[in-house]
Amino acid sequence: MTGLGRTAALAAVLLAVTTGAAACGGGGKSSDGTFTMGHSEPDHLTPGNTTSSYSFDVITNLFDNIEGLTKDGKPYPLAAQSVDTTDQKTWTIKLQPGRKFHNGEPVTASSFADAWNWAAFGPNGTQANEYFQHVQGYADLNPADTNAKPKADKLSGVQVVDDTTLKITLDGAFSQFPFLLTYPAYAPMPKAAFKDMKAYDDHPIGNGPYEMDGNWQHNVQVKAKAFPDYQGPRKPHNKGITWKSYASADTAYTDLRAGRIDVLQTIPAAKVPEAKRLLGDRFIAHKKSTIDYLGFPLWDSRYANPKFRQAISMAIDRQGINKAVYNGDYIVADSILPPAIQGHRDNACGELCTYNPAKAKQLFQEAGGFKGSMELYFSNAQPTYYQWMQIVANSLKQNLGITDVQFRQIPASDYFSLLRKHQEKGPYRQNWEADYPSPQNYLENMYGPGNRMNWNNKQFNDLIVKANGAPNQDEAIKDYNQAEDVALQEMPQIPLWTWAGQAGRSSKVDNVTITPYALGLLVDEVTVKK
């Protein structure tokens, strides 16, 4: 994502079961072929109006995008027959004929074009608006002056050739476009959606393997059932799923142990040792694409020297924090990119991400030290954030002599708004999970123009442009890696650790696979025991 939206949703993890959810009772009944997943409440269920991973868990099963993702993170035609280009700028998309929405309406090229135009039109205020910025004409729908009237209400780069053909023109060569087409914002919507968007958000009509089973019961549950007329490749192996809303990871874990839910994608870190022991082979360790970072407000001159930022990085004992807070299960970061993303290189960060108090002190002194109070910002979304920030603070005091370190713990609902407005006065915690499994999604969206740190580096930006226009993925990876090297040397934000995927299932379900991408749980593959 572009440094604005999705991280806020991703950083939160389930916090106390709502009264309504508790009243709902048990998990999926094995006899009816459905199952229940413990889940945090989505914010929206309209594809172009959310950047929340919790919403994606639902949306990716209600909709088939142009492209899907394989289990190893490679795009493949899903609603499309083919996605072709000769120059990485102009793309021709041929759709599978005969596909239908859940209400019987045919899925056509206009179904995609209408949905994309709606999401990209600035006055609609959709959360996923910026994901269309690579498409030609985006600026006409989103004037820099927010008070100005847009010049157009449709993307000039989206052309409906016929019912099964789209021609897409981007604002420049972009080799990662097939990955972007897997992102939930690029799902189609039927004409029925635009008659009442509010009602549609409560009962989205998609083209995917599952259809809504009643309306979304806010703060209680979302129910979906297998769509009997689905013509795509993701044929459900069960009859349906209920995403049961929780606000507490601990409560959801208790319900998993009691068999009241069947799948929980995130077991609280403090409960992991117990879960491994009690669940046995029902404990599921899986890869994640989420990395925690410590960012710097570079508009403050105290943080302007790269040597100072390198010193902070080398003063942090990542492995010690991993053992103390995360049971040693997380992966200490040695790159901006997590291991699950193509382009990750072992030890790309080298000594700059290695704990070395003596070298850190030397760099700190060469940078001129630090004056005043250092404020550390983080949200209250998880107790582990406070735990590791305490350790970081102690490291800064002991290893660098920064004696005045203050905590600024911000409510999760306000935290990313504060970062977007550049209101933080010190280093801040953020994380990033793959919107789509491309190194571009991490590098350009976190470090490119408009980034949260206010970092600007021409060499980095030029390398990103070169990578985006590369003739093939191998060449693109080389250029993205060079750009990563620039960012690691400058260290406008510090990579810390990649999250460990720690999930669990009940004895009623099997074939539970969780991917590190927006797909999350492969719902269609889950089998329910009779």
Image (cartoon, helix red, strand yellow):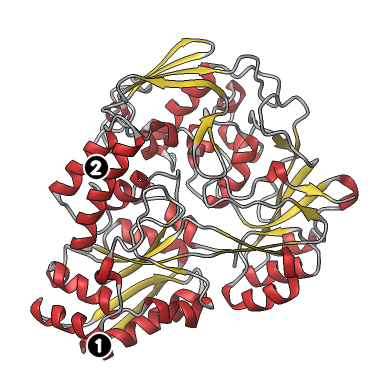
Specify which label sits upstream in the sequence, 1 or 2: 1
Q: Nearer the viewer, residue 47 or 226?
A: 226
The residue tagged 2 is 464
Secondary structure under tag 2 reads helix
Residue at image position (31%, 31%) is 174
Give the amino acid type for the residue marked by disc 2 in the picture.
Ile
Determine whether 463 is above or below 138 in the image: below
- Decide: few, some or many residues near mark 1? Use Cα within 10 Å; few <14, some 14-19, many ≥20: many
Q: What residue type is labelled 1?
A: Asn
Q: Residue furthest top?
A: 162
x and y, in percent, of residue 529 in the image: 86, 51
Residue at 55% across, 50% down: 43
Q: Quadrant of residue 455?
A: bottom left
Specify the quadrant of the image occupied by residue 504.
bottom right
| Disc on res. 399 | 1
In depth, the one of 278 and 376 nearer the eye is 278
